[in-house]
Amino acid sequence: MSNPVTIDAPEGVPFIDITREFDAPVAAVFEAHRQPDLVRQWMGPRDLAMDIKEWDFTSGGSWRYVHTAPDGQGYEFNGVFHVVRENEFAIQTFEFGGYPDVVAIESIAFEDLGDGRSRVRIHSTYPSLESRDGMVASGMDQGLTQGYERLDALVA
Amino acid sequence: MVDSLADERLDRAFLALADPVRRRIVARLSRGPATVNELAAPFDISKQAVSKHIQVLEHAGLVTRSRDAQRRPVHLDAATLEALTAWIDRYRLIHEQSFRALDAVLAAQASTVTNQQDPQDPNQQDTDQEAGS
């Protein structure tokens, strides 16, 4: 049995809250976020290859990676780690290359639950409801750029 | 993977709903069909602009317009909307996948630590290489 993930995208506010527990000590979970070699093994959709260009999980460090779909299309994501406190807390910015200048701020709390268990709590803040829904949708769905082009053509 | 046609339709629907006016139109239509005039009434924008919004919703498959009646009321297409409400489920699915992969990484790390007493363990290499591609 895997631990359930709780995802809440509340109405009327541009937030997303994600909570998940792990049957592993908080230090191990923190390491899995810190080491790019480990990050590459778990972050993002399974069918996309993750090429980490930069990953400096320290206060003031930056990160950048490209997700490549089976059709060869690449999706670039980038941001900076505003603060990183070992085994405890981090704040990062998050920007999707296909949706430039729309930057989400994400805090990640690493919580020690004792008995070798831990919890991760992610709170994402988007600039607007539209960008939250748009970026979340774009994070999952390929072809958003094309979608925008079609929409632009339609409403022009 | 979801087939690309369905994906495209979903993209269009999301984009159509990225606009507050169109969301309000959809909200109004969820209570029943309405004419363009009725839909335009609560807004400070021209009937033409509202027509354009309805066109976008129509193109996204979110609404349809009856051909028979003279007033051509706009109807909500419940099926598309239903498909759309699944976006949070898809977002959830991706995180579910990631976190399960993280579980596997953590388990591999834990066994690597345990195996450090036994550097000959052949599984150690394998678990380290277990990258999701």
Image (cartoon, grey):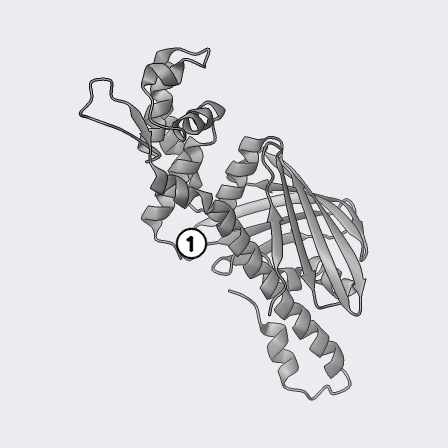
Image height of A151 relative to B78, above or below? above
Q: Residue at x 78, y 69 (%)?
A: A116
Q: Residue at x 59, y 51 (%)?
A: A65
**Residue reaching furthest to the left:** B68
Q: Position of residue A78 (x, y in %)?
A: 62, 44
Q: Position of residue A56 (x, y in %)?
A: 72, 52
Q: Position of residue B19 (x, y in %)?
A: 47, 27
Q: Tell me how many marks there are.
A: 1
Nearest the eye: A40 or B13: B13
| Chain on which label 1 sits | A
Does residue A26 appear in this view?
A: yes
Does residue A44 appear in this view?
A: no
Location of residue B125 by image quarter: bottom right
Nearest the eye: A116 or A45: A116
Residue occupied by mark 1: A72
Q: Could you say whether the residue bearing mark 1 is in a helix, strand or loop?
A: loop
Nearest the eye: B61 or B34: B34
Q: Is residue A89 left or right of residue B123?
A: right
Q: Is residue A104 left or right of residue B77?
A: right
At label 1, which amino acid type do we have? Gly
Location of residue B27 by image quarter: top left
Q: Residue at x 33, y 26 (%)?
A: B33
Image height of B96 relative to A130, above or below? below
Q: Residue at x 55, y 60 (%)?
A: B97
Q: Position of residue A58 (x, y in %)?
A: 77, 51
Location of residue A37 by image quarter: bottom right
Mark 1 crowdedness (10 Å alpha carbons): few <14, some 14-19, many ≥20: few
Q: The N terminus of chain B appears in which quarter of the rendering?
A: bottom left
